[in-house]
Image (tube, rainbow, N blue to C red):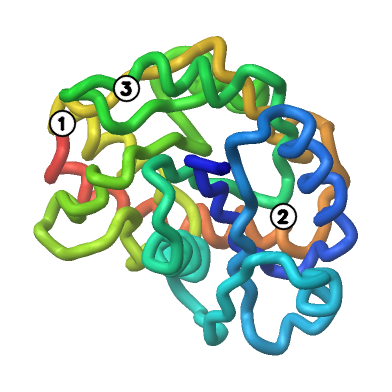
Amino acid sequence: MTDCVVIVPMLGRAHLMDRLRISLATSTERARILWVVTSGDFDVLDELHGDDHVITPPRARGDYAHKINAGVDASDEPLIFTGAIDLRFIPGWLEAAERLLSDQVRVVGTNDLTNERTAHDHSTHTLVARDYVQRGLIDGRPGLLCEDYIHEYVDDELVGTAKKRGAYAHADDSIVEHLHPMAEKAEWDETYLRMRTRMRADRGLFNRRRALWT
């Protein structure tokens, strides 16, 4: 029986789905993947093979955050992990993060071995206790992630908000490796290349909103 749902927003990259399935299955028996797929992403839809999934309409803005939020709404496990297709789960990651949960701490960051900040106090992919979702965004709107961003800085707001609430801890020994080209762990494809444009577009929004939690 699983008690953790790993929500994986998909945008192409169907060829990586088996790699993620194997990585998660060999790291823990307690978690399952919930794929969140854009309607019309036929290569991904063809690779589902009956797996649990949610289908969402295409969005120009907020696609990642919207898919995570949709996955939260479509699942009921007490633990939620904000996943991605380009991850490698190291055995023990879930237990290491779970150990830091408490009555106060409901959001735990993991170490992705790629972004130096995730070895200390930031998290790109994060374990969240389901009851924390009820607290909503820091501006009072519902949801776990803010859908105003195109893609970047969503994790910064999640972590910043949890820190402001005293609900965050960081598990340096919870390793979920981010296989990203910034660390030469993947090739730069079309989706990764759009990151630079998204970063510029989202930075202004992040700078305006960060006063809410700093």
Secondary structure of residue under mark 2: helix
Describe residue 181's horizontal placement relative to residue 149 as left or right: right
Mark pair 3, 2: CA separation: 33 Å
Query: In the rendered image, which quarter is residue 162 located in?
Result: top left
Q: Which residue is mark 2?
A: 192
Vertical relation: 166 (above or below) 192: above
Quarter of the figure that contains the N terminus? top right
Q: Which residue is mark 1?
A: 164
Give percent across and percent down for residue 37. Answer: 64, 73
Badge nearest the viewer, 1 or 2 = 1
Q: Residue at x 12, y 45 (%)?
A: 212
Q: Residue at x 43, y 22 (%)?
A: 98
The numbered mark, 3 or 1, whose residue comes first in the sequence reads 3
| Residue type beneath disc 3 | Leu
Vertical relation: 95 (above or below) 154: above
Query: Which residue occupies the foreground of this view, 112 or 210?
Result: 112
